[in-house]
Amino acid sequence: ETGVTQTPRHLVMGMTNKKSLKCEQHLGHNAMYWYKQSAKKPLELMFVYNFKEQTENNSVPSRFSPECPNSSHLFLHLHTLQPEDSALYLCASSQEGGQGAGNEQFFGPGTRLTVL
Amino acid sequence: EDQVTQSPEALRLQEGESSSLNCSYTVSGLRGLFWYRQDPGKGPEFLFTLYSAGEEKEKERLKATLTKKESFLHITAPKPEDSATYLCAVRGYSSASKIIFGSGTRLSIRP
């Protein structure tokens, strides 16, 4: 596997279900991110992890719960979601630190989530 | 507050018809400006990073340029496979690890 992988690629769940999204990066990066992408809206940053520590929670509802067990893996645990949470959920990674670097992010293919 | 505005929202071109996409930005100290390509239902694919005004980068039919207020993505003699949404994003020195994305330009190339 290369780059950033995400599973599952598609997920349909009811409002009372609990599910998890998984992300794995094979780039040796030290930071990982969750984004939400809804139709006709800019990418919305949800969570940031640097060296496995959460450094940003962008006012995300508690029905979304991230977990970062190590610098290569990131999870997003979902429970009691709402239909408006239906979107493409993207994981990204980057290498933080280093002088002069813009620290570009590399994205996975995303999980298309539908909440019924 | 850091901000990114992309125009036009959508652009339809004939194959071979060159054009440019615009990204206007405001940021307190530019750390990097990024261009991505995104195909429907897929994650954004990294294209370029630009760091300072006057810088240019090229990849195949794409060329990105940067001034202190905006960036252009020039597409020369496009082909139908260049059809995608092109995203611009900026990162400032004051925004820690946050990258701010624009809404994108949806580019369609007709054969």
Image: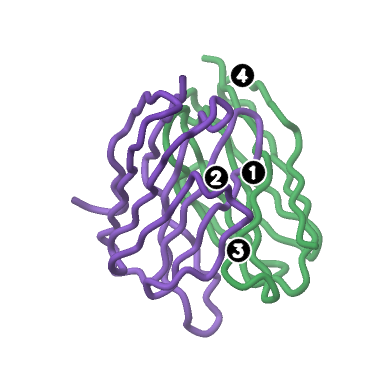
Chain colours: A purple, B green
Q: Residues within 10 Å of mark 3 (few under 14, many from 20)?
A: some
Residue designated by label 4: B14
Residue at mark 4 to residue at mark 1: CA–CA distance: 15 Å
The picture places residue B46, in percent across and down from the top left corner, at: 46, 51
Spatial CA span between label 4 and label 2: 16 Å
* Chain ID at mark 3: B
Residue bearing the label numbered 2: B62
* Residue pointed to by mark 1: B74
Provide the secondary structure element on which disc 3 rests: loop
Question: Label for residue B21?
Answer: none
Report, in whole angstroms, how far the alpha carbon at label 2 lies from the one at label 3: 26 Å
> With A15 as the anchor, is B21 left or right in this view?
right
Same chain assignment for discs 4 and 1: yes
Say which quadrant the N terminus of chain B sits in: bottom right
Question: Counting residues from the N terminus, which is met first, the one under dot 4 or under dot 1?
Answer: 4
The disc labelled 1 sits on which kind of residue?
His
Contact, mark 4 vs mark 1 (Cβ under 8 Å): no
Secondary structure type for disc 2:
strand
Q: Are marks 4 and 2 on the same chain?
A: yes
Q: Nearer the viewer, residue B96 or B13?
A: B96
Residue position marked by numbered label 3 in the rendering: B98
Q: In this rendering, which labeled residue sits more in front, label 1 or label 3?
A: 3
Classify mark 1: residues with Cα within 10 Å, few (<14), some (14-19) or many (20+).
some
Residue B56, compared with residue A79, is above or below; it is: below
Q: Which residue is found at the position 56% from the left and 16% from the top?
A: B110
In the displayed structure, B16 sits above or below A106; it is above
Q: Position of residue B71 (x, y in %)?
A: 71, 54
Which amino acid type is marked by label 4? Gln
As displayed, is residue B103 above or below residue B49? Answer: above
